[in-house]
Image (cartoon, grey):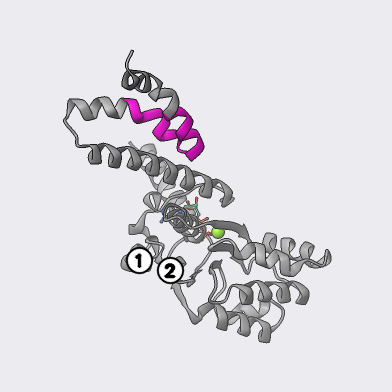
Amino acid sequence: MTTTAATKDGLPSMIAYLTRVLKTPTIGAFWEELAEQARDENWSHEEYLAALLQRQVADRESKGTVMRIRTAHFPQVKTLGDFNLAHLPSLRRDVLAHLATGTFVAKAENVILLGPPGIGKTHLAIGLGVKAAHAGYSVLFDTASNWITRLAEAHQAGRLEAELKKIRRYKLIIIDEVGYIPFDQDAANLFFQLIASRYEQGSVMVTSNLPFGRWGETFSDDVVAAAMIDRLVHHAEVLTLTGDSYRTRQRRELLAKEKRAGRD
Ligand code: ADP
Ligand code: MG
C-alpha cells in the first residue's frame, strides 16, 4: 500500500475529526456527496470548496433564524405574508416594505404602530420582528405590562441597571399594548428608563391603541409621557392605522355568507 493510498483511506475519519474541531457539522455531513457531484459535473477545486462552505453557512444562518424566532417569545408566529394588505389602505406599502428589510434595526431606529383594537398592530409587530430575526437581529417581544413586571422585579432586587444592560443585548425589543393597562408613577418611571436606556442604542417597536396625546393618562404623568415620546419618536417611523377591526370584518363577512347560504 502506498503512502498516498493510506492517506486517502484515512481521509473520511480525518475530515470527520477536522469538521468536529471546526464545529462545521454540515461540511462533515455533505463533503462526500458534494465531492461526487463535483466529479460528475467537473467542478474546479474552487467551485467545490465554495459550494461546501456555502452549504455550511446557509445551514448556520437558518438555524440562527430559527433560534432567534424561538427566543423572541412571540405569542404566536405571524408573518407579513399572512397579512392582508388590501384590508388596510391606511398602511403605506412602501413604508412596510422598507421596515421589512430590517435596516431600521441596524440604525437603532424605532417603530410605533398606533391604531384601534383589531386593526392588526400585534400581527404587524410580530411579522416585522420575524423579518428582523431573518435579517440576523436578536428580538424580544412582550406586552407592556410584562415588561414593567420584569423591570419592577429587577428594581426591587437592586439590579435594574444590569437588567437594562441585558435587554440592550437585544437589537430589537417589541412592547405590545401600551395603553390597555394604566401604569402607576413607579411603573411609568421604569418604562421611561427602558426607553431612555435604548435611545440611539437599540430599536424599540411599540404598539398602542392610544394616540400620543393620551399617553399621559396611561402613564399617570404628562411630563414623563412627553419625555418618553420625545425619545421614542426622535428616530422613528410612526404608523397610524385607521379602519375597521379585522376581527369585526371577518365576523361581518361570515354573517353575510351565512345569510346568503340561508337564502339559497
Ligand atoms: P391589534 O393588535 O391591532 O389589536 P391584531 O394584530 O391582534 O390586532 O389582529 C387581530 C386578529 O386579526 C389577529 O388574529 C390578526 O392576525 C388578524 N388580522 C388583523 N389584521 C389583519 C390583516 N390585515 N390581515 C390578516 N389578518 C389580520
Ligand atoms: Mg394587539
Contact, mark 1 vs mark 2 (Cβ under 8 Å) = yes
User: Relative to 24, is 92 above or below?
Assistant: below
Residue drawn where x is 65% and y is 81% of the image: 216
Residue 202 is situated, as x and y percent measured from the top left of the image, at 54, 69
Q: Secondary structure at mark 2?
A: helix
* Residue count near mark 2 (Cα–Cα under 10 Å), binned few <14, some 14–19, many ≥20: many
Tell me which segment is drawn in magenta: 15-32
> Could you tell me the amino acid type at mark 2?
Phe
Residue 231 is situated, as x and y percent measured from the top left of the image, at 56, 81
Indicate the quadrant where residue 246 lies. bottom left
Q: Which residue is mark 1?
A: 98
Q: Which residue is mark 2?
A: 104
80 vs 110, nearest the viewer:
110
Residue drawn where x is 51% and y is 48% of the image: 69
Residue drawn where x is 42% and y is 66% of the image: 243
Indicate the quadrant where residue 42 lies. top left
3 vs 186, nearest the viewer:
3
* Ligand 1 within 8 angstroms of badge 2 C-beta: no
